[in-house]
Image: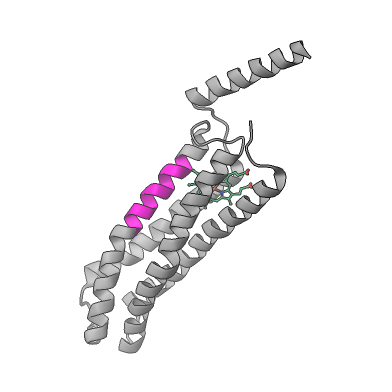
Amino acid sequence: MTVFGPRLRNATLTAHVTASLGWFGSVAAFLALALAGWFSAEPQTVRAAYLAMDVVGWFVIVPLSIATLVTGVVQSLGTVWGLMRHYWVIAKLLITVIATALLLVHMQPVGHLAEAATRAALADGELEGMRIQLVADAAAAIVVLLTAAGLSVFKPRGLTRYGIRRRRREQSLSAQQKAAA
Ligand code: HEM
């Protein structure tokens, strides 16, 4: 049984796809800035990169990750997919919740680097562990988001136990309705 009509479903799907692929694109920009911050020999570029990462992280990436989560849950509950019926939906839910939580945790080093870069130009090798970590985080996020996008498009088969029970119940209900008509 679906809650949304076709128009509403398309409208909410547009919001979901826009938010999730916007999230992917903004993480790609984040990775480019993290690489510039790590590799550049220009103190101005390094400073600008970490300051931009702080702004892009808090004002673009975090809101888009939350928007993806909210629109994804709405899309699941409003369509035949359901939230707990298919393994691919559960996998995307877990990926999104974990990625959002890790993003919030890993915004701390970004703030730290942005603050250090504001005070003085970062010297070669200074806070190197943190700078490398940001590159690794952003690259890992790209892989994870690509996995989620692949799951969304391929929608691999596989019903959960709850999904199987729901499907049986719906089938027997429609058989009863046909018999009564
Ligand atoms: C990184 C996170 C995510 C990405 C990149 C993503 C991407 C997408 C894309 C591109 C589609 C359109 C696929 C198509 O129409 O063939 C889609 C559909 C869908 N997504 Fe997501 N999504 C994400 C997170 C979530 C979450 C957290 C949920 C819910 C738990 C979710 C539930 C759904 C559902 C149910 C559909 C099918 C909607 C329909 O057919 O009406 N997604 N997603």
Please tell me which residue lies in front, 14 or 2: 2
What is the magenta segment's predominant secondary structure?
helix
Relative to 159, is 13 above or below?
Answer: below
Residue at 41% across, 43% down: 94
Q: Is residue 114 left or right of residue 7?
A: left
Q: Is residue 121 a member of the stretch shown in magenta?
A: no
Protein image colouring: one colour
Relative to 75, is 25 above or below?
Answer: below
The image shows residue 118 at horizontal and vertical percentages of 26, 84
Please tell me which residue lies in front, 162 or 128: 162
Residue at 49% across, 54% down: 68
Q: Is residue 92 a member of the stretch shown in magenta?
A: yes
Quarter holding the N terminus is top right
Q: Is residue 74 left or right of residue 173?
A: left
Picture mark count: 0
Residue at 24% across, 83% down: 122
| Quadrant housing residue 77 | top right
Please tell me which residue lies in front, 19 or 133: 19
Q: Residue furthest top?
A: 179
Relative to 143, is 27 above or below?
Answer: below
The image shows residue 127 at horizontal and vertical percentages of 21, 73
Please tell me which residue lies in front, 15 or 131: 15
The image shows residue 89 at horizontal and vertical percentages of 51, 39
Quarter holding the C terminus is top right
Q: Residue furthest front?
A: 180
> What is the span of residues highlighted in magenta in the rendered image?
91-103
Residue at 22% across, 67% down: 129
| Quadrant housing residue 134 | bottom left
